[in-house]
Amino acid sequence: MGHMSVPKMKATIKLDPTWCNANISDADWVEYLRKGCLVCDLARTKESRAPRKQPTDMTISPPGKRFVADSLSLRQPSAEFGFDTLTRFICLTSHKKFTFAHHGMTEMAMKEVYDKMSARNRPIHGEMDVLKMDAHPTHRAYGMQRFIAAAGGEQEMSAPYRHEGVNVVEVSWGNDVPRMMALLIGARPVSYT
C-alpha cells in the first residue's frame, strides 16, 4: 500500500534525529514484517479464494463501446448529499474510469446511473455496445435488462457469487478503497478552537 522497503526504511530512520539513536535490531525488523502494518491490515479487503479463470472476449473494441461496471456501498452516507452507493464504469479499451454516486441499489437508481453514463459517453463515442456487470439482483432485474436493450446495448453478467467477471472494476476498487480507508484511519480530527 505504499510502504517503502526495509532497507529504505532503515536508512530513513537513521536520518531522523528523533530515531537515529534508537537501537532497532534485525530481529525487530523481522518481527515487524511478521506482524505487518495495522493500518494496512484494517483497510485491506478480503479476497476470494475461488478459481479466477473466467471466459473473456479478447477482441479489442473501439473506445467507449465496451464497459465493465460494479457498485460499492458506503458504510456512511456522504455528508453533503447523502449518497450511499458508488457505481464505477471502466472502458475496456481506454481504461478510463467514470464513477457516479447515487442513493441505494434499486432498479430505478441503476437506470439513472446508466442514463448518466450514456449521456456522458454518447456525444464522444455514441451508444455503449456492451456493459458487463456482476450478478447483483438489481443488475439482473428484468426491467434493467429491457432498459439496456431498449437503449441499444447488450448486457453481460458474470457468474453468481463470482466477482472475477468484473475484475477490472474490482481491482480498481481494491486499489482505491484500502488507500482511502488508510487515509481515514490515519487522519486526525481537526480542532477549530
Image (cartoon, rainbow, N blue to C red):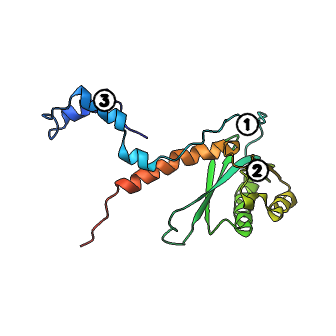
48 to the left or right of 54: left
Give SS at disc 2: strand
What amino acid type is highlighted by mark number 3? Val
Is residue 191 placed above or below 46 in the rendered structure? Answer: below
- Asked if the residue at tag 3 contacts the one at tag 2, i.e. Cβ–Cβ closer than 8 Å, the answer is no
Q: Residue sitting at 71 percent across and 56 percent down?
A: 136
Q: Which residue is mark 2?
A: 131
Whole-percent x, y for residue 168 in the image: 64, 42
- Asked if the residue at tag 1 contacts the one at tag 2, i.e. Cβ–Cβ closer than 8 Å, the answer is no
Give SS at disc 1: loop
What amino acid type is highlighted by mark number 1? Gln
Is residue 106 placed above or below 20 in the rendered structure? Answer: below
Is residue 180 placed above or below 31 in the rendered structure? Answer: below
Who is closer to the viewer here, 38 or 189? 38
Q: Which mark is residue 30?
A: 3
Is residue 134 placed above or below 57 in the rendered structure? Answer: below
Who is closer to the viewer here, 37 or 56? 37
Q: Residues within 10 Å of mark 2 (few under 14, many from 20)?
A: many
Q: Residues within 10 Å of mark 1 (few under 14, many from 20)?
A: few
Q: Residue sitting at 57 percent across and 45 percent down?
A: 172
From the image, state whether disc 1 or disc 3 is nearer to you. Answer: 3
Q: Residues within 10 Å of mark 3 (few under 14, many from 20)?
A: few
Q: Which mark is residue 54?
A: 1
The alpha-carbon separation of the residues under discs 1 and 3 comes to: 38 Å
